[in-house]
Amino acid sequence: MYNIKEADCTGRKEFMMKRRICMFLAVMTVLTAALQGCAGGKPTGSSSASGNSGTGEPLSGGEITVGIPQDLDDSLDPHLAVSAGTKEVLFNIFEGLVKLDSDGNLNPAVASSYTVSDDGLVYDFTIRDGIKFQNGEDVKAEDVKYSIERCADTTGGEPLVSAFSDIESVDIPDEQHVEIRLKTADSEFLSYLTTAVIPADYADEATAPVGTGPYAFVSRSPQENIVLKKFDGYWGTEAYLDKVTFQVVSDADTVVTDLKGGSIQMYARLTASQAAELKDGYGIYDGTMNLVQALYLNNKAKPFDDVRVRQALCYAVDPKSIMDMIADGKGEQVGSSMFPALKKYYVEELNDTYSVDISKAKELLSEAGYPQGFSMTITVPSNYQPHIDTAQVIVEELKQIGVTATIQMVEWNSWVSDVYKGRSFQSTVVGVDASYPNARSMLERFTTDSSVNFINFSDTEYDALFEKASSATNEAEQISDYKQMEEILSKEAASVYIQDMADIVALDDSYGGYTFYPAYVQDMSKIYRVK
């Protein structure tokens, strides 16, 4: 029924079986403790470093190899890239008119300054004097106009950037200025102008990208690596390292070995058990990923087309035990599709919509016609160990309500094509991030007609609230609408929400400067060798 290609797991079956048994015993221990009223402290989600974190005077020059769990398997064109794993690398190559910093501020980038009219309809940007693309060409107002209009184009259906559908015109008053006029005021519009500015007359962005960022593209070897070099003509603070290689490490079991062996010097999104193996020679940095990990349910696939079944799973799955199991309690629980870094939109109270209640879960399943439970498949990308570990805990927790879940591991490109794009799945464990630092980009994906609504959620009230919020001129009303949308996702159990996952980063202690962002990015310009 679910036409999903299964990954080649040769050599892993015995390991995974032993792992599942150990996980089951540990989960039972956690559940017993929970019943006795034991609870750990709430993780803060703040970034910190421990172990042999690099200290000392920063040196310029040198290179680093960074392990990544997947190939950049979609387009390198920043306007067409789909996966978060691709975008976090492209962050180093491209910039928009404004750029997000590590404190969550939007600072001028390609633009040196901007003004917004009193009615919020006209944005006037001054192009930064002397700024160049990595191919040596000057950035012109025509390039900015081209980039904005390209992402606003609707000839292929939806615009590449949904908020750009509200653009009335993009004009060039003179060669140093670009004026963007909106049909209606939009308090979130500026955050969408992190959209990359690219050359108007360049046709090879998909394979040899050119931007204005601190690093320039050198080469890409599919399924192996992508290589960047420092852009010497960068307008801002130059990067320390001369070269960065992002090395594909598609087998999660080899990450620690590769780090210890020195073939990679940095890896983000480790599990707690992996980090524990790196006591010497590595600094371990703790933060959060700025995404929503959940057991995402296909709302059109039986039995998840029944809200009672979805709610039953929510009552059976315990996010806190999952965080304890896979990250020693690190991470931030979430109760809807919003992560805590987007502070003004996040509703912490939704974490309490469901608490573990096995009797209630069984009652709901009985009402829905499944008194003996049912069988289901959880499709998980095989290159993300934290998602695999989460799925294994969920399997054991669902047994308590008579639900037999089977994990189907697939290669990442199969997950993207079959699950995300093809919507041919029953359930999946992944993390979903915000493409832009605002609530709209996080919540729009679950509107009925969204092309990226991969869980097939549909609710008329939700859709109406989105339309109201996206055209709101009063920010307080807009935030209220978004919070109501989050409440609908929670109460309708669109998915089984779990956490904003712990981001555990290992960095060889001969390097320093690792910085967390309130977005899913890796800023390599701040990494340096230690003297």
Image (tube, rainbow, N blue to C red):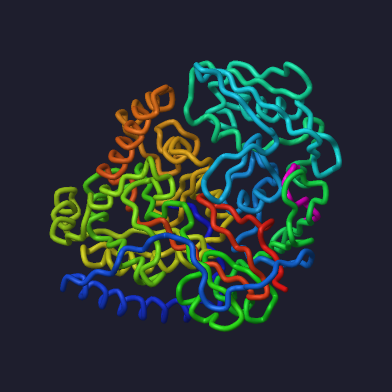
Direction front: furthest residue: 57
- Vertical side of 58 occupied by 112: above or below: above
In the image, residue 525 lies in the stretch drawn in magenta: no
Q: Position of residue 503 (x, y in %)?
A: 49, 63
Which of the 4 quarters of the picture holds residue 524? bottom right
Q: Residue at x 80, y 40 (%)?
A: 133
- Vertical side of 223 occupied by 478: above or below: above
Which of the 4 quarters of the picture holds residue 8? bottom right
- Vertical side of 403 occupied by 12: above or below: below
Direction right: furthest residue: 136
Quadrant where the image shows the C terminus: bottom right
Span of residues in magenta: 211-219
Instruction: Compare residues 2 and 180 and report the one nearer the observer.
Output: 180
Q: Residue at x 20, y 54 (%)?
A: 370
Left or right of 146? Residue 389 is left
Q: Position of residue 47 (x, y in %)?
A: 48, 62
